[in-house]
Amino acid sequence: MERQVTGRFAPTPSGRLHLGNIFTAMIGYLSVKSRGGKYLLRIEDLDAARCPKSLAYAIMRDLDYFGFEFDGEIIWQSERADVYKNYFDILDREGLIYPCFCSRAQLHASTAPHGDTPVYDGKCRLLSPAERPKRKGAARVIVPDETVSFTDGLYGYCEQDLKKECGDFIVRRADGVFAYQLAVVVDDGESGVTEVVRGRDLLPSSPRQLFLFDKFGFQRPDFTHVPLMMDANGERMSKREGKSNLEYITANFPDPRPVIGMLAFNCGLTDKFEPLSLKELIPLYDVKKLKKEDIILDDRGLFSK
Ligand code: GLU
């Protein structure tokens, strides 16, 4: 059966959004809306202590300012621990979970970075129950000796040998909070997400997540990772910096169209620097127009006026 095209924006409210996040949300939105699909909002406040509700509401106001309209109910990860537990138990019943007691410093010493992903050497998997410390450990899932591949909507064919390039990964932290990797798959799977659009910094997580999609019996979504947005100095955008921060923008631009038009021009969607709304951009969207290289924001003086 054809599934309804469904995308989502999934911010972590540990800070205010920046323009790079708005760019990612915009591509996700245009990609599904240009095919008549649904766009969901999920607040990834798994770590409730670091993610105050006030920041989540500030994010919603910012999204509203840009004209995003979301379908369905907002999902709050902080309310879904019971659901994550059910899926965690599937892995546990299969004997795929073991506790890990490695400290940050030990992990640093025993993991070899592979690209952006540190590879865990499986040290704690070898501990017998008697050798395990009495304190609570984090829970890791055992990955198979397999290569997982997918075709990214923008970056094309990608593959990862889970054992060699990722290693067993954490699905629940020692403090009992479920890990992003597990929660994101459960939520995307249960919400029927057919397409994940997010920053290319998360591309190395996708094979791990596909492994969990298969384990939980969910249909795999398509992935499109998008380039990161850099400020004029070529640095990754931060939430505070300069006049491209959302506090400045929302206070100084009563109409968001010049800012949206600027993002569209910067990423290759339009060839003119002109004000446009999200709705006006829908018919202009084509993934083939998007640049693959990271984007150094060129505001053409918009923020210095
Ligand atoms: N919550 C993640 C973030 O804010 C995004 C997760 C995702 O899109 O899969 O970076």
Image (cartoon, rainbow, N blue to C red):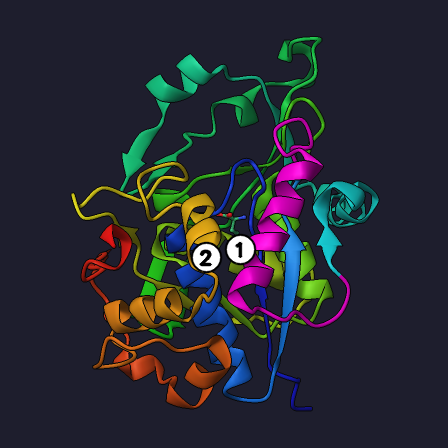
Locate residue 217 relative to residue 305 in the image: left or right: right
Residue 58, given in percent of the width and then of the height, sits at 61, 45
Q: Quadrant of the N terminus?
A: bottom right
> What residue lies at 29% left-to-right and 83% top-to-bottom?
288
- 69 lies left or right of 233: right
> Is residue 31 in view from this perspective?
yes
In the picture, the quarter occupied by the C terminus is: bottom left
Residue at mark 1: C-beta within 8 A of ligand 1? yes
Residue 33 disc label: none
Work out whether residue 178 can be spotted: no
Callouts 2 and 1 close, C-beta under 8 Å: yes
Residue 94 lies, with reference to residue 223, above or below; the image says above
The quadrant where residue 138 appears: top right
Q: In the drawing, does residue 141 fall left or right of residue 243?
A: right
Q: Residues within 10 Å of mark 2 (few under 14, many from 20)?
A: many
User: Is 223 situated left or right of 85 in this image?
Assistant: left
Mark 1: amino acid: Gln
Query: What residue range appears in magenta?
Result: 46-73
Dot 2 corresponds to which residue? 206
Q: Which residue is mark 1?
A: 209
